[in-house]
Image (spheres, coloured by chain):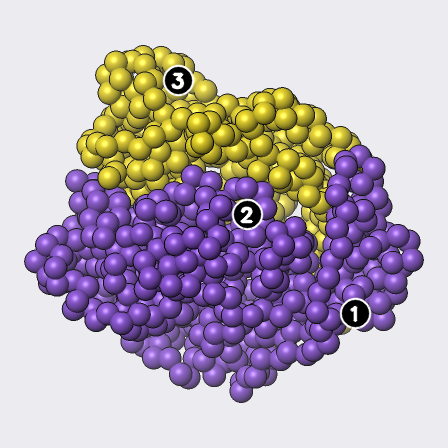
Amino acid sequence: MMEHVEDIGDIVFSELKKYDFTEADAFVSFKKSWQIVGGANKIEHVNFRQNIGLGIRVIIRKKIGFFATTVSKREDIQYAINKAYKIAKTVNEDKNWVSLPRNLGSTHVEGIFDKKIDELSSDELIKLFLVGLEVIKTDKNAYLARGKIGGGVARIGIFTSNGDSLVKKESLASTMFEINYKKNGIVGMGYEYDYSRMWNLSIESVAEKALSYAKKSAEATKIKTINKLSVIWHNRFSLKILDNMLSTTITADAVQQKRSPYMNKIGEQIFDENLTIIDEGLRPAGLGTAPFDDEGIPQQNTTIVEKGVLRNFLYDTYTANKDKCKSTGNASRSYKSLPRPSPHDIVIKPGTATLEDMICNISEGILIIDTIGEWLSDPVSGAINATVTLGAYIKKGEIKNFVKGFIVSGNWFEIAKSGIRTIGRDIRHDLGVSTPSIWIDKMVIASD
Amino acid sequence: MEDYIEKALQFLMDNGACFADARFQRRVVNSVLAENKELKRYEANSFSGLGIRALYRGAWGYAATTKLSKEDILTAAKIALNISKNLSEKQLNEPFEISQEVINDNFSLKVRKKLEDISSEERIKLAVESNKLSFINKNIKNSRTIVADFSEERLIMNTLGTRVKIKIAMVGIGQSVVAKVNDRYEKIFEQKSRCSGFEFFDKINIENFIVELSKLVTDVLHARAAKAGTYPVVLDPKIVGLFAHEMVGHATEGDLILRKESILQNKLNMKIANENVTIIDDGLVDTGYIVPYDDEGTKKNRTFVIEKGILKRFLTSLETSIKLGMEKTGNGRAEGIFSAPLVRQTNYFLNSGDANFEEMIEDIDFGYYLLGRGAEGGEVNVTQGTFTFNTGPSYIIEKGEVKDLIKSTSISGNIIDTLKNIELIGKDLEVSTSIFGGCGKEGQLVKVGDGGPHVKVRQMIVGGIE
């Protein structure tokens, strides 16, 4: 009976009858997933997991109580309600609170649930992993250091004391191969990964690409220069930087709380006019696509930056009420947390150049492919620092050799405003962000 | 619960498993966020779940669930066994036998102010009042204060007879502050955490912690960035923690050795650093994260990884210790019940030496004194041997003296080269931990501690924008 999110919603509101409150809602999440973990050229183990979680919000006038729990039996639900109620009794009124959202609804979206993932068995996963492993074993210098294939489904239910009841189903498949490649006594490492809403992972292609990066890595050498150089952010790297620089600073919450460098800049030309950034909540089969957000507001596509001009921030209901505007359908949460605005999928509008076109036009520069530590860059000050583990040295329009072991630094605001030379066409989709490769005028290289 | 688990383990042995273990976890978390002088969010939760693992002819199956009835637990056991049998049919696995010193123990961290006795009011008051202290000048635009705590019980049972119960509690305060002047912004985050009851907050000077951080971020608004290049550096204990953890720690994890991923795999018993370098992984450091037993029920000993410059041991779990033919160091750890244990560090630190701070800086003509306050972490590529971490706001060292403040920067180096470049090691020693973060590996985040004394390194790569 606890198998269905609707049943848990029913129990919550039948138990809540014992309490006196203004409004309440329940966020119920049922997740089930399989994962294969491989290493040392074989499958190491196979995991199966399922998790039922419930987050309860009890509101007494403008006082908000919240408690979350895993659900195994009815008593877990009773306990959580009681806790949420007690916290609501304790806290001060939130003067900005208006009410739970009243305009709940759903938009038609496509390609976000695949029944095949719901019905996966360890059999299929193991077979698929072995296909990837065969590709790697064809090269005797290659070796699978680490690999994963996973598939999972989520059923999310949102139930409110106003009588709303919404359920969404999503699925996600993922894979990653990390390969060591030995050449002339040097061991290189390369990886590739892929996500899909459907059970259609192209394992061979992921394994082949990982192998190709591992080969490049085995050839990579140190560079001796310390200089300002033209750089291309390969889409593997631009994804990580754009996500870091934008995902926490373009929300209405960050702006209202004065921790966003974009505050008071709506309508201003903040970036290069070739830069258009859209938060896509509806793209068919998109990794951030859903019929409604995590508080039941229909998702939408929202233009953040249009030709360099800052147009919008991302809102949930609470922050929208504060600014007296409408939610953009960006509420995000897990059962353990309260809703907050967060991007679905930050998409940089691609240009027309291929990666090769950009390389052709560089007299001296570096293509940054893989890095570590780029996540330590600071979206508030705009300081970008990344240690390059795989790059390519470009001279006179050609890749001369592969390089590694140096730090690239720059300032995001300066780069995004006046340092972008070309935006590529090779868009890559990742969780929460989709970007093409981007040619940047100059960054500082630190090496020994 | 324990009866149900016993029956499930018995079922696994009766049906052909050669080893099985189960982990039950119950965790209660409170997190209070105050932002700009007001309560922003109070989030609390209770989590209970079970993970069960079966080994059949060298193949592992693992199942985890939050459904905890007798039938659900038996179902999870059956799934784990089916997976392992299925895997053993489709892939040739070399069978191996798990051995372990059988342990029956209850470990309960001693606390004075139990977390279950702390009211929501007390948590909220601490967060909001601390937050108000940060607005020391008009440059401070945003301040976020998080007061977080959790209490956790872990029960580990296996078919060899091990029964270990661990009960711990952790508390911490985190402070993030944003300052602005003209169109320039700076942000800094710092935290203080301890495995402790709520009494920890009586022992630390919260006002000082909050105010100093606001002063620092204000100063950084006017600080220069580091100059890109290679320089001699002196690292403070907090940065040495990141340095030890990222540079040496991961590369000594037994699973990465077994998968031939680590650049240190063929260096056992070789001299890889100067004689003054000793690096230790210890589960029981008061100011670190307390790990008396790992998540496989193995006692976590004090492990000397590098002794006097010689690489002596790798960190191991049950499986890796057998496959590598090495001692069990008690480092099989999992984030929670949804994941099988990996080899993880506990409290990883560089042991103290005999140098004074003055000796470290006196012959530096130009270099940096790199500080950990406000540093947020690091990362390593263990195959290539490249590591990186960021620093907090730091200082220039010029002609043997500590001079101007610089903004946070990034540091990088190669493991093999940098270990040899450690010149001087200080007399001081500090180990710390964090409730707010942890160490990420293969999607699992575990709590760790790290630290060391002040250290002088002959040269490291410093990132910069000049």
Classify A217 as above or below A25.
above
User: Which residue type carries mark 3?
Assistant: Leu
Q: Mark yes or no: residue B45 visible.
A: no
Q: Mark yes or no: residue B263 visible.
A: yes
Mark 3 vs mark 1, CA separation in Å: 59 Å
Relative image position of residue A258 (x, y in whole percent): 33, 54
Classify B83 as above or below B6.
above
Residue situated in front as seen by the camera: B308 or B208: B308
Numbered disc 3: what chain?
A: A
Residue labelled with disc 3: A355
- Residue A151 left/right relative to B44: right
Mark 3 element type: helix
Mark 2 vs mark 1, CA separation in Å: 29 Å
Is the residue marked by circle 3 packed among few (<14), some (14-19), or many (20+) residues within 10 Å? many
Quadrant of the image containing the C terminus of chain B: top left
User: Which residue type carries mark 2?
Assistant: Ile
- To the question of a shared chain for discs 3 and 1, the answer is no
State the hue of chain A.
yellow
Q: The purple chain is which one?
A: B
* Residue drawn at 41 percent across, 43 percent down: B385
Select label 2 or label 3 by which is in front: 2
Relative image position of residue A387 (x, y in whole percent): 35, 40
Q: Are marks 3 and 1 in contact (CB under 8 Å)?
A: no
> Which labelled disc corresponds to residue B161?
1
Relative image position of residue A49 (x, y in whole percent): 73, 50
Residue labelled with disc 2: B257
Select label 3 or label 1 by which is in front: 1
Relative image position of residue A432 (x, y in whole percent): 51, 38
Quadrant of the image containing the N terminus of chain B: bottom right
User: Which residue type carries mark 1?
Assistant: Gly
